[in-house]
Amino acid sequence: MTATLLTALADLALPATCAGCGAARTGLCRSCAAALTARVRVADPSPRPPGLPPCWASARYAGAVRAVLLAYKEHDRRDVLPALGGALGRAVAAGVPRGPVVLVPVPSSPAAVRARGGDHVDRLARAAAGRLRRAGWSPRVVRLLAVARRRRDSAGLGAADRRANLAGAFRGSGDPPRAPVVIVDDLVTTGATLAEAAAVLRATGVGALHAAVVAATLRRVPITPCRPLCHARDETGGDETPPRG
Ligand SMILES: [Zn+2]
């Protein structure tokens, strides 16, 4: 078998580049995979939106983490889903003791679902549930939230404008479960999306509420250290404004 043919076969079997750093002919490389769980911390937006439940993030939204999330969301790189699901699972595990847990994905708009060929947060939640199950939790993904009305794109909006943009954006869907509920999303920026989702769930009778995300932004979300499941390695990165709150 010629070297050219072997290379062609390798390209078919693996994505052309690492979604995080662009390294050639590999899936997600070790370094970028490690970055996804490098800083499991409580994300504490400032100002903190009223009603935001305790929110755990697995990494900072910068550098390779940002690249991997964008590759997954905007360029349909499904090969990174297991790693992102693992990162979200770590954030859930940091906030909720081992046992039953209900993961509630923040719903995407119908337009985003069409553009991305499905709900990217729902897929993340299911990947996270698989990881949690293997680690001894009893997770269920339940779609307790639905989109109630259209939202403007929140990119570039300040905290108050994001809250106003999100008011009434979701509606409750289904009965409150007895297990702890964790609202899950890919990112937290100002916390406005998660606070609005939490308000809707509380109105339907959900009691014990937490939130978990893959990544937290640097600029608007100072991250305070926690004790459990923390990693010592620090990261530095850019100062980005992600597309949602
Ligand atoms: Zn990489």
Image: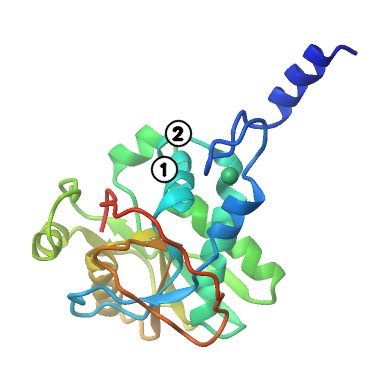
Residue 236's x, y, as percent?
Answer: 42, 61
Q: CA distance from mark 2 to mark 1?
A: 7 Å
Q: Is residue 104 visible?
A: yes
Q: Is mark 2 within 8 Å of ligand 1?
A: no
Above or below, 238 relative to 217: above
User: Residue 143: image x %, image y %?
Assistant: 42, 61
Figure check: 96 above or below 123? below
Q: Residue at x 56, y 70 (%)?
A: 90
Give amino acid for label 1: Leu
Q: Which mark is residue 217?
A: none
Q: Quadrant of the N terminus?
A: top right
| Nearer-the-camera pick, 2 or 192 | 2
Ligand 1's quadrant is top right
Front residue (pair 233, 106): 233
Q: Quadrant of residue 166?
A: bottom left
Q: Element type at marker 1?
A: helix
Left or right placement of residue 102 versus residue 51 in this view: right
Which image quadrant: the C terminus? Answer: bottom left
The residue under label 2 is which amino acid type?
His
Question: From where the camera sits, is residue 214 visible?
Answer: no
Residue 187: x and y in percent read 37, 59
Label 2 Cα crowd, 10 Å radius (few <14 / some 14-19 / many 20+): few
**Colour scheme of this structure image?**
rainbow
Mark linked to residue 75: 2
Circle 1 Cα neighbour tier, 10 Å, few/some/many (<14 / 14–19 / ≥20)? some
Residues at marks 2 and 1 touching, judged by CB atoms closer than 8 Å:
yes
